[in-house]
Image (spheres, rainbow, N blue to C red):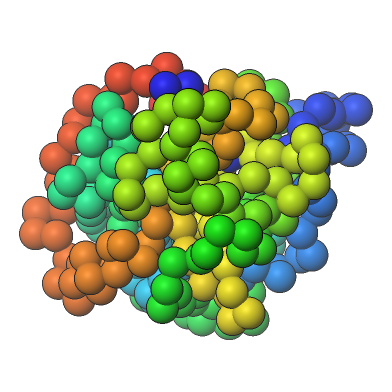
Amino acid sequence: RDLCVASLAGTVTGAAEDGTFLQPSIIGGHAAESHSRPYMVSLRFQEVHACGAALVHRRWALSAAHCVDGRPWQEGMLLVGLHKWRDPEPGAQRFGIRAACPHPGYDNNTLENDLLLLQLDRKVALSRTRRLISLPRKEPAAGARCSLAGWGDPKRGRLSPTLQEMEVTVMDTRMCNNSRFWRGKIGPAMICFQGLHRGSAPAKGDSGSPLVCGKRPAVAGVMSFGSRDPTDPFKPPVATSTVKYKKWIQKTLRKGCGSGQPEHTGRTKHPFLFTQVGF
C-alpha cells in the first residue's frame, strides 16, 4: 500500500533566506484564519514539526500511532496555541511528553488501529488560542462535509509557515474498498475522504491531523495514510475513526497506559508514510 500523511501545501513560488515560504500555494486548500483552530497541536522532533495532533484533554493530545513508530518519543515536544510553526506566537505553550500510548492493536503493516494518545508533562492553560476539541457521538456518514488542517510539507524537509486547511467529503466505505480504489485494504475503523474540489487533496506532512466534522466541530478521525500521488482519485486519503475507539480513548484519558512505552518500536514496513522525514 502506498502511504502518505496529509499536507495541505503544494508548490512554492519563492522562499526566504531562512527557508520559510514567502508565498505557499495549496492543493485545493487555503490558509487558515489565525487561531481559528485552537485545538491544533504540533508534534515535533529536533525542533521540526513532524505530525499534527488534536488537544482532546488538558493533559492529552490525539494523533496517529505511526508518528512515533521507531522514534524516541521521549525526545518529542508538543506545541499548543500556535499558527506559525517556525515562529510560535507569545501565547504558544511548549510541553514535554510524559507518555506515548498507541492503541494496543496498532498494526504497523496494515495501519489498522492507527491511533496515539500523547500525555503532556503538565496541564494546558486554556485560552482563546488553546482550546479542547470533543469526540463525536456518531461516525460521519458518506457525503458528510468535514475539514482537515495542518502545516504541510510541499517539498521534502520544508513546511508551510502558517496553518493551512481544506474542506473534504466523506466517501462510502464500500466504494472506497472496491477494486477501483483501495482493493479491500480499508478496515472497518477507517474513513476514506476526498477533497471537496476536484484535484484537491492532502499531501505530505500532516499525519495525525484531525478530521473535523459536525456543526459543533469534533475530531471524527485522525489522518493515517493515502497515496504516493496525493491527487490520485483512486487512492483517496484515509483517516482512522475515533468513534470506533471512543471507549479506549476515554479509558486512556482517565487511567493512562501503564508504562507509557509503545509496544511497537520498529518503523512501519511501508515506505510512503509521509510524516516529516529525517527522524
Left or right of residue 6: residue 132: left
Residue displayed at 51% across by 81% down: 126
Q: Quadrant of residue 73?
A: top left
Q: Is residue 203 above or below residue 53?
A: above
Q: Nearer the viewer, residue 94 or 164?
A: 164
Q: Nearer the viewer, residue 211 or 84?
A: 211
Q: Identify the residue at image location x=28%, y=47%.
A: 113
Q: Quadrant of residue 21?
A: top right
Is residue 182 depicted above or below 8 in this figure? above
Q: Is residue 197 left or right of residue 40?
A: right
Q: Is residue 217 visible?
A: yes
Q: How many marks?
A: 0
The relative height of residue 227 versus residue 143 in the rendered view (above or below) is above
Q: Which quarter of the rendering shows the N terminus? A: top left
On the question of residue 70 being in view, the answer is no
The residue drawn where x is 34% and y is 52% is 189
> For the C terminus, which image quadrant?
top left
Which percent across, then down, holds residue 17? 82, 27
The picture places residue 42, in percent across and down from the top left corner, at: 52, 52
Find the residue positioned furthest to the left: 258
Q: Position of residue 120 (x, y in %)?
A: 34, 63
In the image, is 35 to the left or to the right of 114? right
Image-based side of 159 in relation to 257, left or right: right
The image shows residue 236 at horizontal and vertical percentages of 58, 36
Identify which residue is drawn at 34% across, 71% down: 59
Between 222 and 41, the residue placed more toward the observer is: 222
Name the residue nearer the viewer: 175 or 263.
175
